[in-house]
Amino acid sequence: MLEVSIQKRLQAANGELPLKLDFSCKSGEFLVISGESGSGKTSLLRMISGLMSPDTGRIAFNGQVWFDESLNTTPQQRDCGLVFQQYALFPNMSVEGNLKYALRKGQSISDIDDLLQMMEIQGLRHEKPARLSGGQQQRVALARTLIQKPRLLLLDEPLSALDRGMRVRLQDYLRKVHEQFELTTVMVTHDPSEALRLADRIIEIEDGQIKREGKPADVFGHQGLSGKFQFTGTILELKSESIITIATVLVGNQLIKVVISDTEQKNLRIGDEVIVASKAFNPVIRKID
């Protein structure tokens, strides 16, 4: 279990931001930290990993204290791995070289072979990062972190630079990795559909404080919807036809069209993240808060 109870005064774009967070993450849980840019999400991950120190508080994982008033362990002493938003691969090293650099004492090249195969990048082992696509670079960055076999995985908006189709595919990779390696995972994202797809639980941060937390359905406010299926997607088009309005929604790589009411039309805009639910062939659509 990850236990976090910290305070830190941060310098934000609009002045000083007092960060004050108190939460826990169960072993094996996939926890998503959501919130607007500048709310303190990335700083939280940096403090958990040891790259930044809180002003006061306590951080512990699986009974081992990483930070308190008398102790501040180094990043190397913490059983966690952090995947950065910009991948942070060594440009002068091949894919294999990047993974070899992260090997711990006693590990063998077979560990690299296994991960390259799992990530479906075994054919790229001799390529350098500049020759890889964004999705391939992300998989290499994830493999380089996993080669160290951490028990806690920290992800800082790892898919934000990718197109939506690639993001959906790599979301499946992240969930697969989380389950196969039996990890405790904390991921920062500001994408509601990504959070809904991956999270067991969501914590939403606003101005350095926890605003809401709970299961995805509770946090994003669509628990009132009932239906035999529910999908999240993005509105690409709102088109009026005669007396009705049709919303075109991108769900994964598929486009679906939903007839919406006048009330729904007033609340929806192109680019909104929405949830589409259906029961008895009567689809409804609602914006994700």
Image: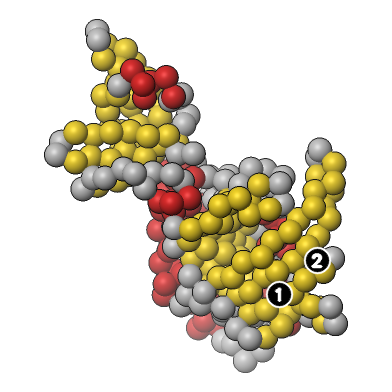
Answer left or right for 37 relative to 13: left
Answer left or right for 63 relative to 163: right
Residue 72 picture location, percent across and down: 81, 78
Residue 26 vs residue 218, the one in the foreground: 218
Residue kind at label 2, given as amino acid type: Pro
Q: Which mark is residue 272?
A: none
Q: Is residue 251 placed above or below 259 in the rendered structure?
A: below
Residue 39 vs residue 21, the one in the foreground: 21
Which image quadrant for residue 97?
A: bottom right
Q: Residue at x 55, y 82 (%)?
A: 109
Q: Residue at x 30, y 24 (%)?
A: 260
Residue 55 vs residue 117, the one in the foreground: 55
Residue on which disc 1 sits: 59
Q: Secondary structure at mark 1?
A: strand
Q: Is residue 10 placed above or below 185 in the rendered structure?
A: above
Q: Quadrant of the N terminus?
A: bottom right
Which image quadrant for residue 57?
A: bottom right
Q: Is residue 82 placed above or below 284 in the rendered structure?
A: below
The colour style of the image is secondary structure
Residue on which disc 2 sits: 54
What crowding class fits label 2: few (fewer than 14 Cα within 10 Å), some (14-19), or many (20 or more)? many
Residue 267 picture location, percent across and down: 44, 24
Residue at the top extreme? Answer: 242
What crowding class fits label 1: few (fewer than 14 Cα within 10 Å), some (14-19), or many (20 or more)? many
